[in-house]
Image (cartoon, rainbow, N blue to C red):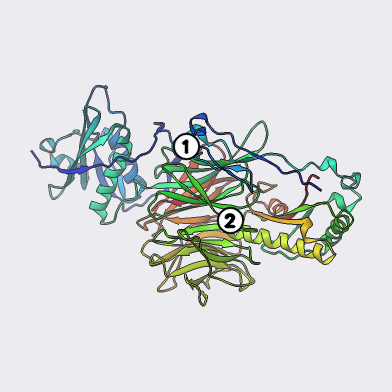
Amino acid sequence: MYLFKKILFISFAIFFVSLAQAELTIEITKGDETAVPIAVVPFGWQGAAAQAPVDLSAVVKADLTRSGLFKTLLERDMLTKPTEADKVRFRNWQALGQEYLLIGQVNEIADQYQVRFQLFDVYKRERLQGYQLMVAKHELRRTAHHISDLVYEKLTGKPGVFSSRIAYVTTTKDQASKKKRYKLLIADADGFNPRSIASSREPLMSPAWSPDGKKIAYVSFESKRSAIYIQTLASGKRIKVSSYKGINGAPAFSPDGTRLALTLSKDGSPDIYVLNLSNKLLLRVTKSYAIDTEPTWSPDGKTIVYTSNRGGKPQLYTIPSQGGVAKRLTFEGDYNARGQFSSDGKSIAMVHANRGDYRIAVMDIATHTVNVLTAGKYDESPSFSGNGDMVLYASKRGRKSVLSAVSVDGRMQQSFTFDSGDVREPAWSP
Amino acid sequence: MKINIITLVLVVGTAILSGCSSTDKKSGLLEGDLNREGNALATEGLDASGDFDMNRLGAEFSDPANPLSKRTIYFMHDSSQIQQEFIPIIAAHAQYLLSHPGQKVILEGHTDELGSREYNIALGEQRAKAVFRMMKVQGVSGNQLEIVSYGEEKPVAEGMDLASLQLNRRVEIAYRVQ
């Protein structure tokens, strides 16, 4: 018998409507040929029902495939389907060309599930990882994503983002009244469990996560003019934090979560301000006659990068977050906007246009090298994954707005399609 | 003269209704814990109701020969400069507002769907402000003019062809119901 490490899962206080349907469908549009082969064997099951309510191995398989770094073995090609270590014959998996093997077992114990899984290096014939988890019944799917995170981290050295969530805005048209409905939704990173957190006949825009992933700031036109709200996800409670005359837009939490950068035009042209969320004091950071908007914070909180057209066309500029001298950051291309820092602060994703093609690019801040990741031509709203490996963005497919994701090295691309209507403005949770 | 204030009606699922409490006096909007995460039923809400009724305005607004019948000013890409051909239209509306000091209009700025959304909100506002300034120069009181920018959030044409993009780069002069 192996000794299993024990992890306690903390139950998140989420009121689950246990609809595990995906409203977003994800398909991989460009794969990586150097993907590492891994066999994920269907997990064993012991419980009252004939089979486990969630097929954990299927979720893990989909997660790992979606990352672009792994290719998983088809179940019908497996010679055996072991669920315990002593049944593993490494020679079988070597013959199938597999480098890694993941097996597992789910047992129903009273009102919980015991989930066990083990990861093996097929060539070294050794176990890399083994965990045993006790999980609440409604958290089985979440557990599968957690397993994917652990496996991903073990094999790549980087934390996985499969347990993260995405916020996005959809519009649908009511067939009868022809009126639009705007919705702000949150879904798991694989598109499952979508839940609407705000809905309006007037535009909803610019969702931004708090650094702890518990709140979302967004812009709502529900009173026929813009206002910024901060909504706590668990309780649904929200507060209006900005409703000045003119623009209230582009909210961005500071890395420590105590301040909110935003765009206001109350004093004339749109400028960047920083609102202290505890004492409500407002600091004006930029002062120009041009458009200044779309602030993003460096991870140390010292710098804000924003879009400005003070030079005629939109370009990215940098300014100390306490105010100071603005410096132009981008020179390549005739349009650079909507910058977003990666979590390590080394690069910025942005909308980059040349002669009318709008694409997603990532700039290395140290070298100023711009790497264009997408083919356009209507790409916008880039958002980094928490580990910095992928960028999620909005694009057009025909007339329809869709979400897509691309790996920062450009080797892997996937598209998320929404069942009905348009989907846009993705924001990846921390 | 009293402006018809559009009240906002919240339709909130009964499970959530108990949590609603205060009313924001300015907007007439209920503040409460609607839209609780995970409760898909409780997300109908935040609806502003009522559109502006053009029928209540005079016949000159529907006479195609009258410049007042045109209430959309179009712009070039990424520009808030007013083009020559729209100056007479803005002037006609300015004249009307001068002779009807109780009448208010909302100048709604819009952009095409190219580029980033918040930048377009700013661009839409600059367009609305350009029309605002031209009306002010002709003597219209600032109290009669209100500005809102929707950026690319409310396109009139949904395509990405040049004609659709052009139709979306606009300021709409919206007369408020008296």
Instruction: Examine the image and state in which quarter residue B49 appears.
Output: top right
Disc 2 sits on a residue from what chain? B
User: Label 2 belongs to which residue?
Assistant: B117
Residue B97 relative to residue A4: left or right: right
- The residue type indicated by label 2 comes to Arg
Q: Position of residue B62 (x, y in %)?
A: 87, 44
Task: Give me the residue at 43% from left, 51% from top.
Answer: A428
- The residue type indicated by label 1 comes to Glu
User: Label 1 belongs to which residue?
Assistant: A23
Residue A232 relative to residue A355: left or right: left
Measured Cα–Cα span from mark 2 to mark 1:
24 Å
User: Are the residues tagged 2 and 1 within 8 Å (C-beta)?
Assistant: no
| Label 2: how many Cα within 10 Å (few below 14, some 14–19, many 20+) | many
Q: Is residue B108 above or below residue A188?
A: below
Task: Give me the residue at 79% from left, 64% from top.
Answer: B83
Q: Position of residue A277 (x, y in %)?
A: 47, 58
Which secondary structure lies at badge 2?
Answer: helix
